[in-house]
């Protein structure tokens, strides 16, 4: 009877992150890391530029998906403003963290910051490519890239801390798409076809860049 009662109250495993969100997340991480590591090498210039363009395309896609995507992918679901973020952070400090199945308010600010800095980094990188003498723009480009790196590191640290405080692995769902929740909280579709389309477009773009080099 005790085991039966435990099974009844245990939360179900539900789909939260659709495939496009997960594909975007990991492709953006790979592109930014690769572009940052190849930024100082002329031999890797094509790789750096290709990853920069890819990052810009991914950000455009995420902005669109933030309005038409599944429930937890939409900005309307997780963008709540600084006051909500401050309230969430206070709950962490008091040891009683507020629980959100999707992005928490602090994480939402980090996401908006990463999208903004990623767009600024890509845009200034494009300007550097167009200008014959663009030392000033190169410095601006590097500044945005370094700010984005700092925010990425803060984001990673926050995910680790939040995982410990919530007693929940917050990284695994970005691979599997599932978290513990109630059945009615699950999204209806994983949109696998859209995620695969994003991967295909990126793969074709990389192939064309390599062929035309």
Image: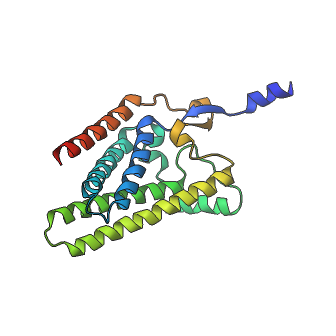
Horizontal side, residue 111 vs residue 14: left or right: left
Which quadrant of the structure image shows residue 133? Answer: bottom left
Q: Name the image quarter holding the N terminus.
A: top right
Horizontal side, residue 93 vs residue 194: left or right: right
Which quadrant of the structure image shows residue 161? Answer: bottom right
Q: Count the marks: how many?
A: 0
Examine the rendering and report whether any part of residue 177 can be seen: no
As drawn, 30 above or below 19: below
77 vs 155, nearest the viewer:
155
As drawn, 76 above or below 185: below
Q: Residue furthest left?
A: 132
Q: Residue furthest front?
A: 43
Examine the rendering and report whether any part of residue 2 can be seen: yes
Residue at 32% in and 33% down: 197
Q: Position of residue 67 (x, y in %)?
A: 36, 43
Horizontal side, residue 87 vs residue 129: left or right: right
- The colour scheme applied to this rendered structure is rainbow
Q: Position of residue 83 (x, y in %)?
A: 53, 62
Q: Position of residue 199 (x, y in %)?
A: 34, 37
As drawn, 161 above or below 64: below
Residue at 52% in and 63% down: 154
Residue at 46% in and 28% down: 189
Residue at 29% in and 71% down: 140
205 vs 109, nearest the viewer:
205
Q: Residue furthest bottom?
A: 136
Q: Position of residue 169 (x, y in %)?
A: 62, 46
């Amino acid at each position: 009877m005790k085991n039966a009662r435990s099974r009844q109250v245990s939360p179900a495993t539900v789909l939260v992150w659709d495939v496009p969100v997960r594909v975007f997340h990991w492709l953006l991480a790979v592109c930014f890391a690769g572009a940052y590591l190849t930024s100082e090498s002329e031999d890797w210039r094509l790789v750096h530029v290709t990853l920069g363009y890819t990052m810009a395309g991914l950000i455009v896609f995420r902005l669109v998906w933030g309005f038409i995507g599944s429930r937890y992918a939409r900005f309307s679901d997780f963008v709540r403003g600084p006051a909500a973020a401050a309230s969430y952070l206070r709950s962490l400090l008091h040891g009683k963290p507020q629980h959100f199945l999707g992005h928490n308010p602090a994480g939402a600010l980090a996401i908006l910051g990463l999208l903004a800095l990623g767009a600024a980094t890509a845009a200034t990188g494009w300007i550097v490519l167009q200008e014959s003498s663009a030392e000033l723009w190169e410095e601006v480009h590097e500044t945005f890239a370094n700010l984005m790196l700092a925010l990425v590191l803060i984001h990673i640290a926050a995910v680790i801390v939040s995982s410990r405080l919530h007693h929940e692995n917050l990284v695994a769902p970005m691979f599997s798409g599932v978290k513990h929740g109630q059945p009615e909280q699950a999204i209806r579709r994983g949109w696998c076809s859209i995620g695969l389309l994003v991967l295909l477009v990126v793969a074709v773009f990389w192939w064309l860049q390599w062929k035309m080099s």
